[in-house]
């Protein structure tokens, strides 16, 4: 079983809708949580970074971490066609894994005009 | 600032050939990483370098070697390429928050 599970999609939504993405994980020692966006044939770019539990908001993006359930989420409000990409969750922070991120496989999102 | 740069962008090799993938960063980061990305597998860490002069194995190091040439540059070498090494390779460097990483544009490698 992978340490980080993420539904591969594709997730298709109409423009203006809320996109809801999530990852589950098994290692309770994870404490740093990130979301990366990857456009086709490009490198991943850091979108959101959260330490420990709670919510973080940045413009149209909201990241949530529920450590008790080992579950993280990313919400994209007022989605645009330019949000069409693959979204990767990543996490780390175990005592023996400094700097070594565990990635989900990514969820492909398609926002249709 | 260019961020993280990688060369080449594309490469086709025959089985048994060798090559070196180059990576450089201009963000003054201490840590650098090499990943491979395969469909359905996500990003998997090959090797990393926590600081200049140190390198360590990641999740999938077999068939690869690395060199941390200086603080800016981190290269990945395939000594004898195999079809199983067909993948997209990404270099990354670590930011001020230890676990945030910034990625290069990738190298698409095909081994025939």
Image (cartoon, rainbow, N blue to C red):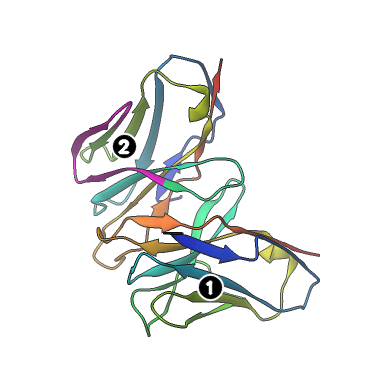
Residue farthest bottom in this picture: B53
Q: Residue at x 22, y 41 (%)?
A: A67
Residue A25, compared with residue B46, is above or below; it is above
Q: Quadrant of the C terminus of chain A?
A: top right
The residue at 27%/61% (across/down) is: B98
State the residue in front, B20 or A3.
B20
Question: Which portion, as a residue range, is magenta?
Answer: A46-62
Q: Which dot marks residue A72?
A: 2
Q: Position of residue A110 (x, y in %)?
A: 55, 25
Is residue A38 placed above or below B53 in the rendered structure?
above
State left or right for residue B44 relative to residue B31.
right
Left or right side of B97 for A47: right
| Chain ID of residue with mark 2 | A
| Residue bearing the label numbered 1 | B61
> Can residue B18 be spotted in the picture?
yes
Discs 1, 2 touching: Cβ within 8 Å: no
């Amino acid at each position: 079983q992978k340490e980080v599970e993420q539904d591969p999609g594709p997730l298709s939504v109409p423009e203006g809708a809320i996109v809801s993405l999530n990852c589950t994980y098994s290692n309770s020692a994870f404490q740093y949580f990130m979301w990366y966006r990857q456009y086709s044939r490009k490198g991943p770019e850091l979108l959101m970074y959260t330490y420990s539990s709670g919510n973080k908001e940045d413009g149209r993006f909201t990241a949530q971490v529920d450590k008790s359930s080992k579950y993280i989420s990313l919400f994209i409000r007022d989605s645009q066609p330019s949000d069409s990409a693959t979204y990767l969750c990543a996490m780390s922070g175990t005592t023996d894994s400094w700097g070594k991120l565990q990635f989900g496989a990514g969820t492909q999102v398609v926002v249709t005009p | 600032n260019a961020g993280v740069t990688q060369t080449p962008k594309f490469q086709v090799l025959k089985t048994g050939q060798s090559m070196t993938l180059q990576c450089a960063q201009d963000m003054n980061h201490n840590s650098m990483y090499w990943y491979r990305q395969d469909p359905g597998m996500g990003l998997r860490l090959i090797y990393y370098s926590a600081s200049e002069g140190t390198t360590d194995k990641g999740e999938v190091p077999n068939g690869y070697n690395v060199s941390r040439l200086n603080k800016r540059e981190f290269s990945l070498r395939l000594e004898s390429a195999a079809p199983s090494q067909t993948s997209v390779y990404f270099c990354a460097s670590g930011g001020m928050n230890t676990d945030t990483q910034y990625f290069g544009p990738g190298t698409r490698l095909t081994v025939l």
